[in-house]
């Protein structure tokens, strides 16, 4: 299965990204709960890109390790970055409305979650959900 | 895509059958509130049986529809939440404050009739 690149620049792209994520999850054989987890995580991350960076890209692909397959996603933007990442992830910053909610939400729904952010340069987030 | 807001008895029914963009969700909120005023509805049924993703933004909009409608005197009952969507919302810690929920449209209607009856007394 080929990687799917979803450009994120407009609000409608959030819907496209979660549809594509769900389609790939179905192809990979995720159950409905897994599909909803993946689509919801992608929705949060796509919205963060629009709100904080303006535009970026989400790539959806198939992940492998020795034992299992999964769905991998990479979200990248060239936005302002996240200055206080630890605090945001701890839920200390805008936990109700803002980026904190989206990031902690996506992290809770995925099995792997890693963020690399450079203030002024942008943010890249890798996530993966394994098929169990 | 705009969501039709229908009149059922003394209540309004909005069925969301597809993925909404953020601005469509905000538009729906404005429509419902305008229609409560216009039609003097005594309650709102929000049918989300066709919604397959409720993220933090969607939950916030649904909650704020409920809050604003309640302030106008029209309690809102959310019906038809899919089980997997409900489970995901729990994992995200998303709450729908100010909104009552029911399994389906029938039960939601029942609930609204009871609420309207109480307020009549």
Image (tube, helix red, strand yellow):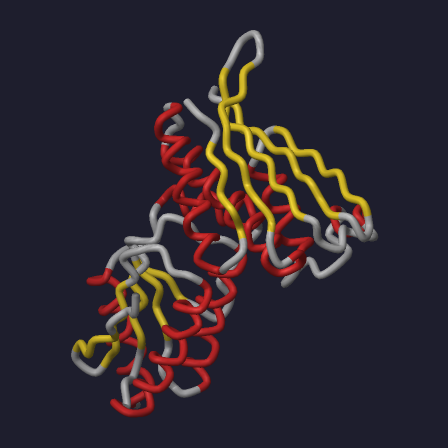
Where B87 falls versus B74 (above or below)?
A: above
Where A63 falls versus B117 (above or below)?
A: above
Which quadrant of the figure contains the N terminus of chain A?
top left
Residue B42: give x, y in percent of width and height: 29, 84
Of B6 and B20, nearer the camera is B20
In this view, which residue lies farthest toward the top?
A66
Q: How many marks?
A: 0
**Which residue: 34% across, 68% down?**
B77
Of A127 and A95, nearer the camera is A127
Relative placement, left or right, of B101 versus A53 is: left
Residue B47 falls in image quadrant: bottom left
**Which residue: 20% across, 62% down?**
B106
Residue A112 falls in image quadrant: top right
In this view, which residue lies farthest toward the left?
B9
Of B24 and B99, nearer the camera is B24
Residue A31: give x, y in percent of width and height: 37, 29
Where B44 falls versus B42 (above or below)?
A: above
Residue A99 falls in image quadrant: bottom right
**Which residue: 60% across, 54% down?**
A55
Residue B21: give x, y in percent of width and height: 42, 61
Residue B107: give x, y in percent of width and height: 24, 62
Relative placement, left or right, of A128 versus A17 is: right
Of B87 and B25, nearer the camera is B25
**Which residue: 46% across, 45% down?**
A17
């Amino acid at each position: 299965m080929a990687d799917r690149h979803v450009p994120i620049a407009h609000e409608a792209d959030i819907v496209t990204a979660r549809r594509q994520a769900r389609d790939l999850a179905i192809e990979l054989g995720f159950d409905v709960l897994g599909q909803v987890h993946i689509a919801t995580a992608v929705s949060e991350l796509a919205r963060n890109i629009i709100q904080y960076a303006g535009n970026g890209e989400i790539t959806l692909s198939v992940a492998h390790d020795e034992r299992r397959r999964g769905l991998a996603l990479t979200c990248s933007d060239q936005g302002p970055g996240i200055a206080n990442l630890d605090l945001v992830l701890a839920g200390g910053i805008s936990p109700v409305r803002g980026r904190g909610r989206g990031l902690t939400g996506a992290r809770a729904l995925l099995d792997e979650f890693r963020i690399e952010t450079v203030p002024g340069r942008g943010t890249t987030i890798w996530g993966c959900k394994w098929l169990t | 895509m705009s969501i039709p807001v229908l009149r059922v008895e003394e209540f309004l029914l909005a069925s969301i059958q597809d993925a909404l963009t953020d601005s469509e969700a905000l538009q729906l909120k404005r429509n419902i509130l305008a229609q409560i005023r216009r039609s003097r509805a005594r309650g709102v049924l929000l049918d989300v049986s066709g919604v397959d993703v409720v993220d933090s933004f969607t939950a916030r909009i649904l909650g704020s529809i409920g809050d604003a409608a309640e302030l106008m005197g029209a309690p809102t009952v959310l019906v038809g939440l899919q089980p997997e969507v409900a489970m995901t919302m729990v994992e995200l810690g998303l709450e729908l404050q100010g909104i009552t929920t029911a399994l389906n449209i029938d039960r939601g209607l029942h609930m609204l009739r009871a609420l309207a009856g109480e307020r009549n007394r």
